[in-house]
Image (cartoon, rainbow, N blue to C red):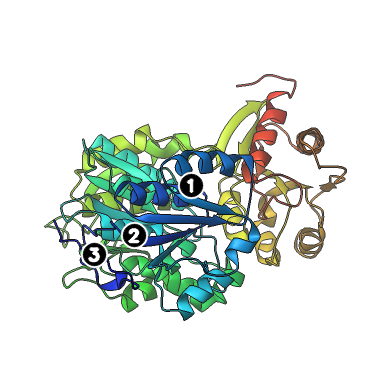
Amino acid sequence: MTASAPRGPGRIDVEHLPWPGLDVSGLRILVAGFGVSGYAVADQTMQRGARVLVVDGSDTPEIRERTTVLEVLGVEVRLGEEHTLSLPADREIDLVITSPGWRPDQPLLAAAAQAGIPVWSEVELARRMQASDGPQWLAVTGTNGKTTAVTMLESILQHAGLRAVACGNVGLPVIEAALDPEGFDVLALELSSFQLHWTEHLDCEAAAVLNISADHLDWHGGAAQYARAKGRIFEGVHRACIYNVADEATRRLVEEADVVEGARAVGISLVAPALSEVGVIDGLLADRAFLDERRTAAAELASLEDLAHLGPHGAGPHIVLDALAAAALARAHGVPAHAVRDGLRAYRLGAHRAQQLATVDGVSYVDDTKATNPAAAAASLRTAERIVWIAGGLTKGADISQLVEASHDRLVGVVLLGEDPEPFTSALDRHAPEVPVRRIDPGDTVDVAGRSRLMEQAVQAARSLATAGDVVLLAPAAASMDQFRDYAERGDLFAAAVSRLPGAHT
C-alpha cells in the first residue's frame, strides 16, 4: 500500500506519485469525454476520493442519464462544446484523462499539454491504480482482428479455469476490470491505436500486434505515427512479444520495443512454425515457442477442424491467424494445450464479425459489417471461392483498387451501397469489368424505415446474383455513417432482411 502524497493547494506532480496502487484521493481530475470509459473513470476515481470534473461536447439523453447518476455522487458534469475548447478557468487541474477518440490537437488537450498537465488514457490510469498483486495483462492490437483474437483469448483462459475477462476496446472498461473487488487472474485487453497513443506504461506479460495497414492516418498524422502508436503495446513486456511473420511491420515494432530483459519475440504464421513460432502443421495449430523441447518438437494445440464452425466453408485464414495469436498469448501465461483446444472449440464469433446468419436455398449469408476498411474486407473475401459482395459506404479516401484486384476472381456479383459509389465503380471497371454490379439507389435514409428499405433492396439484389453454393457477404470495406447510424445498425438491418427472404432456411 503506497502512502498518500501531500495534497496542497498547488498543482500536484501526478507523474511522480508512486504506483502501482496509485492513490488518487484529493487529485483534481478532468475527464474529457463522457462515453463508457469516461463514465468508468469518473466513477472509479470519485469512489477513491478524487475531485472529478467531466466535460463533453454532446448533450444526448444517454449522457444526461449518466450525468444524473454521477452528480448525485458528487461528480460535476459540464455538457456543451464550449466546455471542451479550453481548460476550466475556475479550478486547478492535476490530471486529464481523455476519451480515446479525442485527437492530440483537440483544443482542451493541447492546452493541457502546454500547461504541463499530464494527459493519460483510461488504460494508463488503470495500470497505475491497479495493485502490485493485481491481474496479469495480455494485450492485442492491430488494424484488423483485435476483437476476435481477444475474445478467443478470453475463452481459452476461462477454459483453463482462470478468472479472466475481455476488456478495453471490447467488454469492460480496463479500469473496472483492473480494480474489480473480487479480482481477476488475467485481463485480455483489446487496445486501439487511439488508446495506445495516450498510454505510456502497459507492462504486459505478453502482447501481440496482428497486422498493420493504413487506417486512422488523419488522426495520427501519418502511417509512421500510426505504427508507432500500435508498437507501444510492446513497451515493458516481460514474457513474450507476438508478431505476425507475414507482416514485416509487426516484426519491426518488436525490434524497436523497450522490453524487460528476457522477453522473447514469438512469431505466428499460417505455415509450419520455425523455432520460437506458433503455426500450422498438417491442419494442426502447433507451438514451437512455449515448450522446453521446442528445438526438436512441437506441441499440438488444436486443429483447423476445431475452428470449422467459424466460417461458411471453415475458418478463413484471418480467423486462423487470430486463433494463433490468442493461443500464443495464452501459452505465454502458461495455459496448457488442452485449454487452448477447448477454448477455441467453444468460441463463437460475436455479432457482425464474419457471422454466418443463414443458408437460404443453398446460398450462405454472412454479416461482416465490421469490415469497415479495405484490409478487413480483403481478409473476409478470402474466406470463400464464390461471393456476391455487398460493399460501399464512406471510404474516407481509402484505395479500393488493390482490394478489387486481389479479389476479382472470387466475385460472382457486387451490390453497392453508399452515397458515393465512385471509389468502388472505378476499381471494378478497371479490375473486374466482367463482374455484374447492382447499384442501390441511396434514396431517403434519414429514418430507420428508409435505411431498412435500402438494405432490403440490397439483399434482394444479392439474391438475384447468387446461386446455390455461393456466399452473400456484407463486408463493405467502408464506414457506415453516410447511410446508417453505425456499422452495427447496418449489420442488424442486413440480418433482418435475410431473415425475411422466402425459401428454405438452414
Q: Residue at x 64, y 63 (%)?
A: 82
Q: Residue at x 68, y 19 (%)?
A: 504
Distance of mark 2 from mark 1, alpha carbons? Answer: 15 Å
The image shows residue 448 at horizontal and vertical percentages of: 76, 35
Look at the numbered disc 1 and give the secondary structure of its residue: helix
Q: Which residue is mark 1?
A: 36
Q: What amino acid is labelled 2 in the image?
A: Leu
Marks 2,3: beta carbons within 8 A:
no
Q: Is label 2 or label 3 in front?
A: 2
**Is residue 281 visible in this depiction of the protein?**
no
The image shows residue 57 at horizontal and vertical percentages of: 62, 57
* Residue 398, disc: none
Question: Which of 2/292 is in front?
Answer: 2
Q: Which residue is mark 2?
A: 125
Residue 186 shown left or right of residue 472 in the figure: left
Residue 390 shown left or right of residue 61 in the figure: right
- Give the number of marks: 3
Quarter of the figure with the N terminus:
bottom left
Q: Residue at x 86, y 42 (%)?
A: 444
